[in-house]
Image (cartoon, helix red, strand yellow):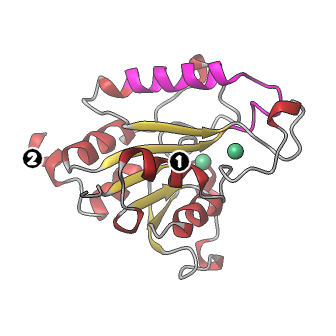
Amino acid sequence: MNLRPAVFLDRDGVLIEDAHYVGCTSRVRLIPGAAEAVAALNRAGRAVVVVTNQAGVAKGMFTEAAVEAVHAFLAEQIAGYGARIDAFYYCPHHPDGEVAAYRTRCECRKPGAGMLRAAAADLGLDPTQSWMVGDRETDLAAGAAVGCRTVLVRTGYGAGVDATALDRDGLNLELVATDLADAVAKLGLGAAARRAA
Ligand SMILES: [Mg+2]
Ligand SMILES: [Zn+2]
């Protein structure tokens, strides 16, 4: 079986503005250039997988149905740019959550790699040929744990991260990019987008 290369994307601060616990479609704002960047990844033959911590569920701020509604809305928004997310994975847990059903120290909450492992198994992906793009160190750690190379973006929380303090080797950090569009261009995966433009 041929395993596909993927690009794993954090959601808040990478695809959409990090508005702090986004549980409602009215608060979804695409980061400029992000939808076009996903379209370029689609054309480059990469599986595009969102892996997002949604502890707002464990904290009782919104339901899993609300998370899924946000994802459906996001998918619809980017479809307008010819872009497609192959799969969304989210972690609804938190070790200190208010909602008992979700109060657990799980393996899916990043920096745990459970969501990436599940996606790799479900979709037939090769993490060692894949990238993880995130705005927090925990995103990069989750990617590195399964052998992805990683990219830190300066959108969202990433604007304030001191990249010089990061363990570049331990995090497989290869690139610090302005935003997702810049990351895709610098990874050499945006050529198809430029030709199509
Ligand atoms: Mg984030
Ligand atoms: Zn979890």
The segment highlighted magenta reads 54-77
User: In the picture shown, does residue 92 fall above or below 45?
Assistant: above
Q: Is residue 167 visible?
A: yes
Q: Is residue 105 above or below residue 137?
A: above
| Secondary structure under the numbered disc 2 in the rendered image | helix
What residue type is disc 2 on? Arg
Along the line of sight, which residue is nearer the eye, 129 or 183? 129
> Callout 1 environment at 10 Å: few (<14), some (14 to 19), or many (20+)?
many
Disc on res. 24: none
Q: Is residue 129 left or right of residue 28?
A: left
Q: Residue at x 52, y 57 (%)?
A: 154
- Disc nearer the start of the sequence (2/1): 1
Q: Residues within 10 Å of mark 2 (few under 14, many from 20)?
A: few
Identity of the amino acid at label 1?
Answer: Asp
Q: Which mark is residue 195?
A: 2
Give the residue pinned by disc 1. 10
Give the residue at x 20% y 51%: 44
Q: Residue at x 24, y 29 (%)?
A: 82
Say above or below: 156 vs 66: below
